[in-house]
Amino acid sequence: MTRTDAPLSVQRAFTLDEWRDLFERAGIGPFRLFPKFPFRQMTLISIQERTSAARLRQDQNDQKRFAGPSPADCDADPAGM
């Protein structure tokens, strides 16, 4: 048994490059990762940009699925239908 495991914990912890790789593989969107004293590192994840990008993709998908009448059909004379 050891008296202190702090050095071992630090050695076993993820490095900045390992965290960066994990975040990129997870596809979490824009992020900044940097060392920050007194912590090992700090990560800032942009939720606003991620939400905006997701909303834009959803809007584009909605436009592709739209199957309503064309503007010309909407302007047609109801008596002629």
Image (cartoon, rainbow, N blue to C red):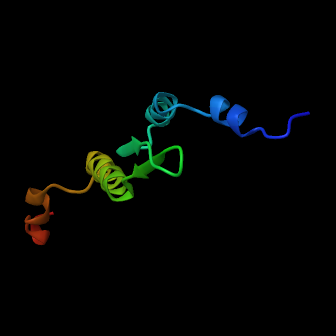
The answer to whether residue 2 is above or below residue 30 is: above
At a point 58% along the width and 32% down the height, the residue shown is 14
The answer to whether residue 79 is above or below residue 69 is: below
| Residue 29 visible here | no
> For this view, does 22 lie left or right of residue 60?
right
**Front-most of 14 and 39?**
39
The answer to whether residue 52 is above or below residue 17 is: below
At a point 49% along the width and 44% down the height, the residue shown is 41
> For this view, does 11 lie left or right of residue 30?
right
> Residue 72, percent across and down?
8, 57
Q: Residue furthest right?
A: 1
Q: Residue furthest bottom?
A: 79
Res. 55 image quadrant: bottom left
Quarter of the rendering occupied by the N terminus: top right
Q: Residue furthest front?
A: 3
| Residue 34 visible here | yes
> For this view, does 63 lie left or right of residue 44?
left
Tell me how many marks there are: 0
At a point 39% along the width and 56% down the height, the residue shown is 47
**Front-most of 37 and 31?**
37
> Residue 63, percent across and down?
26, 50
> Residue 74, percent across and down?
13, 64
The answer to whether residue 14 is above or below residue 55 is: above
**Front-most of 46 and 55?**
46
